[in-house]
Amino acid sequence: MNMNYTAEELAFRDEVRAFLDEKLPADIAAKVKGFRRLSKEDHQRWQKILCKQGWYATHWPEEYGGVNWTPVQKHIWDEESSRYGVPRSIPFGVNMVAPVIIRFGNEEQKQRYLPRILSGEDWWCQGYSEPGAGSDLASLKTRAVRDGDHYIVNGQKTWTTLGQHANMIFCLVRTNTEVKKQEGISFLLIDMNTPGISVRPIITLDGEHEVNEVFFQDVKVPVANLVGEEDKGWTYAKFLLTYERTGLAGIGMSKAALSHLKQLASRRMKNGKPLIEDPSFSQRIARVEIDLTAAAISNLRIIASVEGGGVPGAESSMLKVKGTEIRQAINDLARRAIGPYALPFLEEEMDLDYDGEFLSDKDAAPLSAQYFNNRKLSIFGGSNEIQKNIVSKMILGL
Amino acid sequence: MDFQLNEEQQMLQDTVARLVRGEYSFEKRLAFSETDLGFSADFWKQLSELGLTAVPFSEELGGFGGGGVEVQSVMTELGRGLCLEPYLQSIILGGGLIGQAGNDSQKENWLTGIASGELKAAVGLQEPQSFYDLNNIETRAEKNGEGYVLNGRKAVVIGGHCADVIVISARTSGDSRDTNGITLFALSPETAGIERRTYPTIDGAKGCDITLNKVQVSADALLGEEGKAAGVIEFQAGRAIAALCAEAVGVMEIANELTLEYLKQRKQFGVPIGKFQVLQHRMVDMMSELEQARSMAILAASVADGEQNDERRRVLAGAKNVIGRAGQFISESGIQMHGGIGMTWEYNFAHYAKRLIGINHQLGDDDFHLERYANLLQAS
């Protein structure tokens, strides 16, 4: 029983800290820490810095330009980068489609796409969900019909995160309607500039343009863009989802958000005292901090078991539920901490460049929007209810 | 990072597990609980013969200097068996207080016997008005020629009915909630002026309230420095909290196993009730709470014997808070999902449920520890 890092792990942590001290742009970190909006340029600027360091592709084998971090090293990176305000990598290219290409793609696909992901030349988005296929993903209807060297794709994808920036989309499409729904799905890589594709923004409840609808009308996709075998896409999709699920608990980000909350609660006043000393509010913070402490240890237990050769299974589903509930609880408290100032919806104050007078606390403006935005946490990556179904089936055998 | 027990710790846990499996069937436990002693003298003897009562003590006392993790290994298995023996009261708390505060002759008088299991200790650290605050002490100890005279009342002394020595806290100075002025005494329960009202507890153990009426004790009953016991008590209560958390994890493990088994076996509407999603999700929540509790029990064990500081205080308060909440959730959910059978005395689940609630009422419930944690919040 040992909860400490080894000397090598501590040295790695120092290396991470030195890198972030030196290379993380202050304006980007300030946006992340203050829940401000990041531009496409912000993401690309940071990705270039990470790539130069060789730390962008943490899930890839070294031969493809990845960095072969141990689970503990990945954890250290997650903790430190959250603490420093590093933007979360847009996962669709580097952490989602790339592992699928590496595992199931052909040599040509590896040669073509992996370097372009590393260089930032391609921005990928994910074409999974459809209006009629959410939690029941396998019921998707977007059709791909073979026509010589091409597939003709027709249908609609939705909730496409940052699809407005993307030039590539990986899609689950139906190639066979005669078989069980899971057995007629294929995994296609599609250039977003192909004629017949249109992207329409979906504005979310916080006024944000983060997700989109993507429409396909007679879109011609070369058969060379099929990953693996036709009709085997569901296997690849499930493989990808296990990647998506790890890290969804967001322990590092919750720690950063909690620290932000406690600073905010130290500045806000109630009954003539800092809010953090208010009996009822301090107990609300205490409760979420305690839950986070427990979840952090649970996370370490999973990491240690993976480090020892175990496979993260449905335990990560359980932690995804707990972790997202905790983060949402922190967002809830941050909104409560500003009292009536949770009401004004001041988009101008959400910009880091804002140089006017703040209506109330300097950090107040994004808090309500952030609270609403993060309701997504318990919905995406497999809703928390779906996670419970997984645990029920995989661990409990019910 | 490694969350596995080492070989020795694993052997220790396996030893206790085997013993509990062999000797502590549910039917036997019910019978032990109904005796005057309230537990099994024979099982206690076996624990002692295997050296298990000496686990946290030094080698001179026949122990192997076990720390938080060793105690955790023992307590989790005792929890799984719902064991009634006074391990927490005698070994952890009584032995802990005497070991930390006692002088050589007191250690010789009491500690050797406690470590070997021949003597049983209990502790009277709370009073009717204390409400879990161990500094809230009104029992007075006044110095006189021959030693001290004690007057007051100690509340819910688990294991006090059969103890050979009872360690109590009393005030030698200060007001009822002062940190300073608290003093420990080691008493024989046979001393004149001590009255015990003995009762069974809701979770199957036995305890008593103790009235001290002009109890004359000699100066050598004084344990440690006069007026300076608050820190000792806090430290040992911390060790006991970690031990209780470990016990609770064992209790929760079985409670969840029983519930899951029941969901698979009980049929209604022609299918096992575990096919119903609403019950599946509740079961997953029970598992998830258990994992949170397990994480906190591990963390608590890691600080149990460490330096007394705010970090240790936070961890222990946090752990007891999580254990309290998780315990109640598992207790209530398990009874609910068992339906009628969960309400009966003759089926074992209810006894696990009662112990989980019982643990929440020992050394502070989740509300108490939440407040304590909140008072220790750091701004960043």
Image: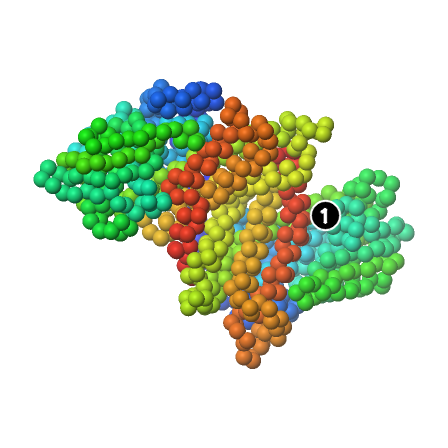
Question: To which chain does the residue with label 1 belong?
Answer: A
Residue B369 vs A332, above or below: the answer is above
Q: Quadrant of residue B223?
A: top left
Q: Residue furthest right?
A: A147
Residue B227 vs B254, above or below: the answer is below
Q: Residue furthest left?
A: B145
The answer to whether any part of residue B161 appears in the image is yes
Q: Quadrant of residue B117?
A: top left
Q: Position of residue B103 (x, y in %)?
A: 18, 38
Q: Position of residue B315 (x, y in %)?
A: 41, 48
Residue at image point 30% right, 33% down: B122
Left or right of residue A373: residue A257 = left
Residue A211 vs A299, above or below: the answer is below
Residue A229 vs A371, above or below: the answer is above
Left or right of residue A205: residue A147 = right
Q: Amino acid at mark 1?
A: Ser
Left or right of residue B153: residue A306 = right
By what rule are the colours in the image chosen? rainbow
Residue at image point 59% right, 44% down: A318
Residue at image point 70% right, 66% down: A209
Q: Residue furthest bottom?
A: A356
The answer to whether any part of residue B225 appears in the image is no
According to the picture, the residue beneath numbered tag 1 turns out to be: A135
Q: Secondary structure at mark 1?
A: loop
Residue at image point 61% right, 55% down: A57
Q: Quadrant of residue B15?
A: top left
Image quadrant holding the C terminus of chain B, namely bottom left
Q: Position of residue A7 (x, y in %)?
A: 42, 50
Q: Nearer the viewer, residue A257 or A278?
A: A278
